[in-house]
């Protein structure tokens, strides 16, 4: 099973071109979609989820023409948007039971078995009787995934799912996504590079509505080996330094700015070649990044 996106474009009435001729083939498993705010990630996900139509292009899930048969796609889709509402005074069990009914699971004992299984899978069974208004951010995200899985989807889309989660909840949520992706296509749309590095065998980077990279994260990292250089730079010299070097990123370590530079050969004696990471790939593709504290 593959999701095949071809030549997808979308412009809004205000003149913003959110997608520009985007083509992707997304196989079964975990697929990471990276990009800064405004890159077009959410527009792409909403289009695939049939929440809006593109100006041009095609989307197919296996043999299914998604844009021509949106209702059929929705029966095979699980979608966890960046922001979603819940009924705060209902228990997790009641919320899931409600959504199972909406998905057409009308036989009571079948619905109960499905709800119990999803609560177990998302590690919410022990709090099944708790009102969801009192849930932590991570618990709400896991309940959101449980809701998305109600119809046993073949395609699951999650949009910025770990934003705002503490490290423990983030780890629990990523482990859950990894488990789910063994059986379905999971598209993880995010601006958090580490989420993609840890989970995804395939990825794409969008910037300004355009596809700037697609492939295996390991191959993208390998392509930068021997081309990323690092050195400490005094704060007062950062502006001048950036004007003379192709800076990928700048971060503080112990209060000192450490700069990563892209160069085919050594940029100077004070530089050390470093093993690149996916963050270097990302910022090399979408432009230089500098910590606010360094500016």
Image (spheres, rainbow, N blue to C red):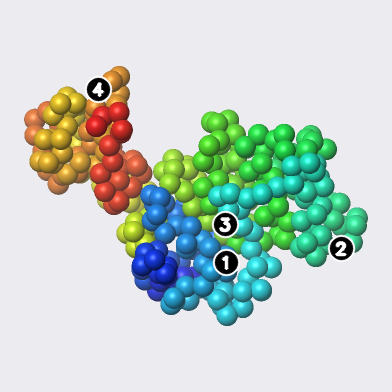
Q: Confirm or deny contact between disc 1 and disc 2 (CB under 8 A).
A: no
Say whether disc 3 or disc 2 marks the residue closer to the N-terminus.
Answer: 2
Q: Position of residue 44 (x, y in %)?
A: 47, 63
Quadrant showing the C terminus: top left
Q: Residues within 10 Å of mark 2 (few under 14, many from 20)?
A: few
Kindly identify the residue that appears in the image at 66 percent across and 74 percent down.
Answer: 72
Residue 157, numbered circle: 3
Q: Position of residue 96 (x, y in %)?
A: 77, 50
Asked if the residue under mark 4 is in contact with the one under mark 3, i.e. CB atoms within 8 Å, the reply is no
- Residue beneath disc 4: 256
> Which residue was labeled with disc 2?
106
**Which residue is identified by label 1?**
51
Q: CA distance from mark 2 to mark 4?
A: 61 Å
Q: From what the image shows, is residue 240 above or below residue 65?
A: above
Q: CA distance from mark 3 to mark 1?
A: 12 Å
Q: What is the residue that sits farthest to the front in this orientation?
A: 14
- Lateral position of residue 92 relative to residue 163, left or right: right
Q: Confirm or deny contact between disc 2 and disc 4 (CB under 8 A).
A: no
Residue 254 shown left or right of residue 83 in the figure: left
Number of labels in the image equals: 4
């Amino acid at each position: 099973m593959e999701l095949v996106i071809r030549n997808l474009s979308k412009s809004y009435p205000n003149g913003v071109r959110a997608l520009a001729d985007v083509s992707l083939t997304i196989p079964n498993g975990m697929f990471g979609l990276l990009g800064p705010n405004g890159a077009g990630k959410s527009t792409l996900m909403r289009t695939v989820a049939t929440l809006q139509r593109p100006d041009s292009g095609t989307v197919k899930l296996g043999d299914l023409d998604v844009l021509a048969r949106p209702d059929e796609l929705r029966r095979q889709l699980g979608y966890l948007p960046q922001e979603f509402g819940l009924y705060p005074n209902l228990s997790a069990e009641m919320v899931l039971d409600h959504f199972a009914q909406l998905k057409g699971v009308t036989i009571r004992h079948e619905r109960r078995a499905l709800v119990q299984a999803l609560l177990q899978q998302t590690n919410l069974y022990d709090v099944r009787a708790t009102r969801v208004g009192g849930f932590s951010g991570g618990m709400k995200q896991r309940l959101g995934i449980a809701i998305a899985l109600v119809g046993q989807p073949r395609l699951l889309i999650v949009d910025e799912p770990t934003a705002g989660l503490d490290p423990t909840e983030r780890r629990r949520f990523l482990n859950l996504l990894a488990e789910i992706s063994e059986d379905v296509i999971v598209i993880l749309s995010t601006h958090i590079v580490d989420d993609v590095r840890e989970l995804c065998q395939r990825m794409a980077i969008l910037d300004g509505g355009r596809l700037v990279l697609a492939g295996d994260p390991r191959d993208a990292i390998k392509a930068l080996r021997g081309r990323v250089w690092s050195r400490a730079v005094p704060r007062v010299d950062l502006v001048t330094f950036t004007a003379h070097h192709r800076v990928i990123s700048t971060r503080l370590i112990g209060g000192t700015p450490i700069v990563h530079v892209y160069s085919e050969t050594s940029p100077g004696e004070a530089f050390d070649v470093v093993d690149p990471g996916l963050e270097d790939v990302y910022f090399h593709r979408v432009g230089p990044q500098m910590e606010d504290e360094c500016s």
